[in-house]
Image (tube, rainbow, N blue to C red):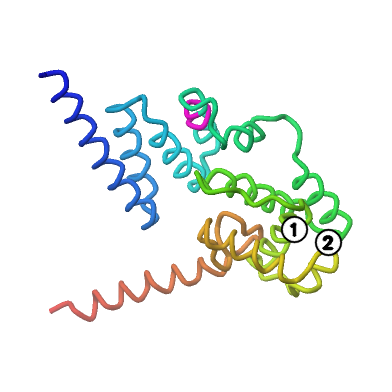
Amino acid sequence: MAKKRKRAAKNRKAEEQEQEGLQAYEEWNIDHATQCFEKASELVPEEPDYLLHMARALARSGNFDRALKALAEFMRLEPDSPLAERFQQLFASGMDNVETLLTDKMAAAGTRLELIGAAIQMWLEYRIVLGRNNLIMRKPETWAAALDYTVRKVNLRPVTRQKIANFYGISDGAVRDRHADLVRTLDVMPCDYRYFVGKENPLDKLVEAAELLEQLEARFQEP
């Protein structure tokens, strides 16, 4: 009876850590989210969802080595998961169909290598952050086009969705839908630091302006 109570208490604490971590994740407090998921996993090490949450948080912060380790532990606990095939591809040495097509098409268009790398990084992160949601994979051209389009928009490159759709031989609507998936799942913003490859990010000026305004406000409030 005492063991059951102790186990129940651990489960309850782990669930509390999970909820706190998910809230922190949504608020982009990634370090705190990761810590919460780690604590939850330590309390109930047999629960695979805590490891999956941890992998998602680590991927969002760009810590892919640790994210992959968390995914490996997830697959150890849930070897027959319908997610196994998607995650196993992340450990492969070669590129998948989307990455191969994306690299070939962007290179053929004369795109800088850094921008191609940003698009591949976006694809890697998306497949992890998607979590238990299904990956809609009908044609690799659709995802390659959406990644190409999204990373160009992040980097403020002049491009239309229709032009990208024509270049990849798919419909404008397909690019629109997958672009929306990427933006929503990864919470992508203009000049997003994760995928921006320019030397000077315009967001830096916004941060500097905000800091300057805060300093001026503080001086204004001085007695």
Residue 142 higher or lower than 156, as above or below = above
Residue 115: x and y in percent read 72, 55
What type of secondary structure mainly makes up the magenta span?
A: helix
Q: Quadrant of the C terminus?
A: bottom left
| x and y, in percent, of residue 90 in the image | 64, 35
In terms of secondary structure, where does tag 2 sit?
helix
In the rendered structure, which amino acid carries the disc numbered 2? Tyr
Q: Residues within 10 Å of mark 1 (few under 14, many from 20)?
A: many
Q: Is residue 174 magenta?
A: no
Q: Earlier in the sequence, mark 1 or mark 2?
A: 1
Q: Label 2, on which residue?
A: 168
Q: How far separated are the C-alphas under marks 1 and 2?
A: 8 Å
Quadrant where the N terminus lies? top left
- Are the two marked residues, 1 and 2, in contact with CB atoms closer than 8 angstroms? yes
For image coordinates 51% across by 39% down, the residue present is 63
Residue bounds of the magenta highlight:
70-74
Element on which disc 1 rests: helix
- Work out which residue is located at the far right of the displayed protein and give it: 108
Q: Is residue 61 above or below residue 180?
A: above
Query: Viewer-proximal residue, 167 or 177?
Result: 177
Q: Which residue occupies the foreground of this view, 218 or 109?
A: 109
Residue type (three-letter) at the residue carrying disc 1: Thr
Near-viewer residue (26 or 193):
26
Q: Which residue is mark 1?
A: 142
Residue found 64% across the figure and 30% down from its top: 91
Percent of width and height locating residue 154:
63, 65
